[in-house]
Image: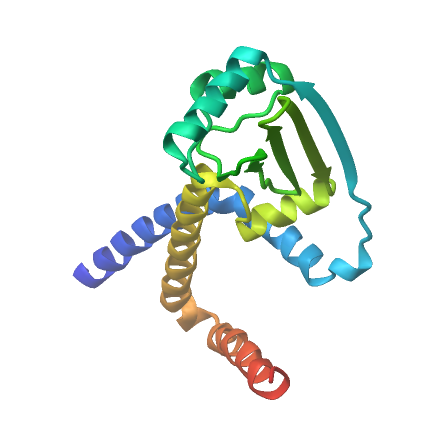
Amino acid sequence: MSQQKSRAFWLKHLHQWHWVSAAMCLAGMVLFSITGFTLNHASWIGAKPEVTTRNAELPAPLLAQLRERWERDGNENAALPAPVAEWLDSTLSVRVEARETEWSDEEIYVSLPRPGGDAWLTVNLQDGAVTHELTDRGWLSYFNDLHKGRNTGSAWSLFIDVFAFAALVFAVTGLLLLKMHAGNRPGTWPMVGLGLVLPLLLAILFIH
């Protein structure tokens, strides 16, 4: 009787953890499954990048502030001052906070990598000319970069960690449930073994 109670206890809790983890990682599994296929067959899907260039002129007081800062500090990687960052955000809708910045006597270059494309911005320290170039490779490239975690930021990186943990819980609880039901399902372990041996054999025989 105690053995039956123990089995019922574990079945109940394993099923609960299994469906909760499945619910948590469902959207991620769909996304990573689809983008795994598109990444594996990237050559089948053509994408033509669209490049957009915009120009503006930095107000004289802000330009003077940049020149003064460069002459005073000479820091080649200093972040742009807050007033300049706010002006760029309001004028060009470009956010440069905490972005990699390169200063020189002629200009300031800001790298703005993003999923699904790329971007950069320059500020000419001589005349205040601002140039922003954005390269967009389309939605498919965007989701492929989400899959790879390319230029996606800390929030998406945290999501990937949570998703990976939920997927691991889903897999482990599924394996334990298979073990508990294997007595009435003779095909369980051959299928589990196939799932383990097949990728191992492919890796050994065909990946060099």
User: Between 50 and 198, which is closer to the camera in this rendering?
Assistant: 50
On the picture, is 201 further left or further right than 50? left
Which x, y percent locates residue 61?
A: 52, 11
Identify the residue at horizontal 62%, vertical 37% (top origin).
Answer: 120
Q: Residue furthest bottom?
A: 205
Above or below, comparing residue 53 to residue 18 in the picture? above
Which x, y percent locates residue 29?
A: 55, 50
On the picture, is 105 further left or further right than 121? left
How does the figure colour the protein chain or chains?
rainbow
* Residue 31 seen: no
Which x, y percent locates residue 18?
A: 40, 50
Above or below, comparing residue 80 to residue 138 in the picture? above
* Residue 166 seen: yes
Above or below, comparing residue 207 to residue 13 in the picture? below
Q: Quadrant of the C terminus?
A: bottom right
Above or below, comparing residue 66 to residue 156 in the picture? above
User: Between 117 and 72, which is closer to the camera in this rendering?
Assistant: 72
User: Between 68 and 188, which is closer to the camera in this rendering?
Assistant: 68
Identify the residue at horizontal 62%, vertical 29% (top origin).
Answer: 124
User: Between 38 and 14, which is closer to the camera in this rendering?
Assistant: 38
- The quarter of the picture where residue 57 lies is top right
Give the total of numbered labels: 0
Q: Quadrant of the N terminus?
A: bottom left
Identify the residue at horizontal 55%, vertical 15% (top origin).
Answer: 87
Which x, y percent locates residue 68?
A: 44, 22
